[in-house]
Amino acid sequence: MESQDAEVPTPLVLSDKEKKVLELHDKLEQLQLEIALVKAQKNYVPDIYPERAVEVAQQELLEARAKYMLRNEVVASVVSANPILQAVHNGTNASPIERDLLPLITERDTTTTALASQNTELHSLLSNLTDVESRSLRLSRENVALADRLLELAKQSEQGKAELLPPGSEYATEIVKLEAELKGSRQRWQVLKDTASAIVAGSGVDWASDAGLREMVLDPAEGDF
């Protein structure tokens, strides 16, 4: 149903003269391309350096394409200038086809304005993206420098500790002994805590309502001693 209600574009009605002009224009472009190809083949001189020849050919192709497109755009602008003026200003001598151009011209201008706005927004987004990437790169470099500095300080700290407490010194032996005792005390405390937690959890007491009991049961065990 929707396809039936959709508007079918009205075919462009051209006079025999206008059709002939368009056919001649297409034929002229085709002939110009063929002439350009013949000239290129005639003027082609093999180069003893293939890589250089490819680069030169690519550059010449880009230049020729740019000139060709520019010329076509100029011709199209000149040819379409008068019909557009007749359509926009609703000239008395405007043909029906020229009058039919007005909605298309309006749509073209609207599309051009929207495209320009989108291009402006795109350039703004690209500029912001460039700034963000620059800041990210700068911060990454700073992070690398800080990490290097941290490693250097850690190394200096270890060296200082080794100098202050040589492995065979009396103080170093005492520190190792105290660390072992501290580790054992922590392990014993953890065993007692786990035992008490299991007793409370299995006793049937409403430990969830009491903050102290709840902390005892739910407090996670310490992984490192």
Image: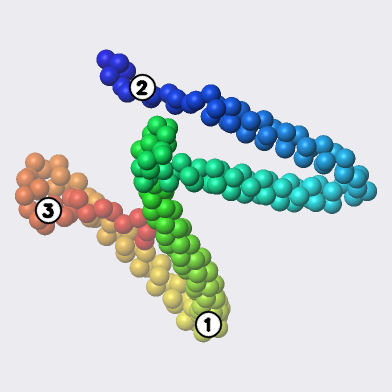
> Disc 2 or 3, which lies upstream in sequence?
2
Badge 2 vs badge 3, beta-carbon distance below 8 Å: no
Seen in the picture, residue 157 relative to 54 is either above or below; the reply is below
Q: Please, what secondary structure does the residue beneath circle 1 have?
A: helix
The residue that mark 1 highlights is: 160
Q: Can the viewer see residue 224 in this picture?
A: yes
> Disc 2 or 1, which lies upstream in sequence?
2
Seen in the picture, residue 155 relative to 88 is either above or below; the reply is below
Identity of the residue drawn at 59% across and 45% down: 75
Quadrant (top left, top right, bottom left, bottom right) of the N terminus = top left
Q: Amino acid at mark 2?
A: Val
Which dot marks residue 132?
none
Location of residue 29 in the rendering, given as x and y in whole percent from the top left corner: 67, 35
Local crowd size for mark 1, using a 10 Å CA cut-off: few (<14), some (14–19), many (≥20): few
- Left or right, residue 200 beside residue 132: left
Location of residue 13 in the rendering, given as x and y in whole percent from the top left corner: 45, 25
Q: Amino acid at mark 3?
A: Leu
Q: Please, what secondary structure does the residue beneath circle 2 have?
A: loop
> Disc 1 or 3, which lies upstream in sequence?
1
Q: Residue furthest right?
A: 48
Badge 1 vs badge 3, beta-carbon distance below 8 Å: no
| Colour pattern | rainbow
Identity of the residue drawn at 43% across and 46% down: 85
Location of residue 203 in the rendering, given as x and y in whole percent from the top left corner: 11, 43
Mark in the foreground, 1 or 3: 1
The residue that mark 2 highlights is: 8
Identity of the residue drawn at 36% across and 46% down: 89
How far apart marks 2 and 3 lie (CA) works out to 79 Å
Q: Which picture quadrant has residue 107?
A: top left
The residue that mark 3 highlights is: 213
Q: Please, what secondary structure does the residue beneath circle 3 have?
A: helix
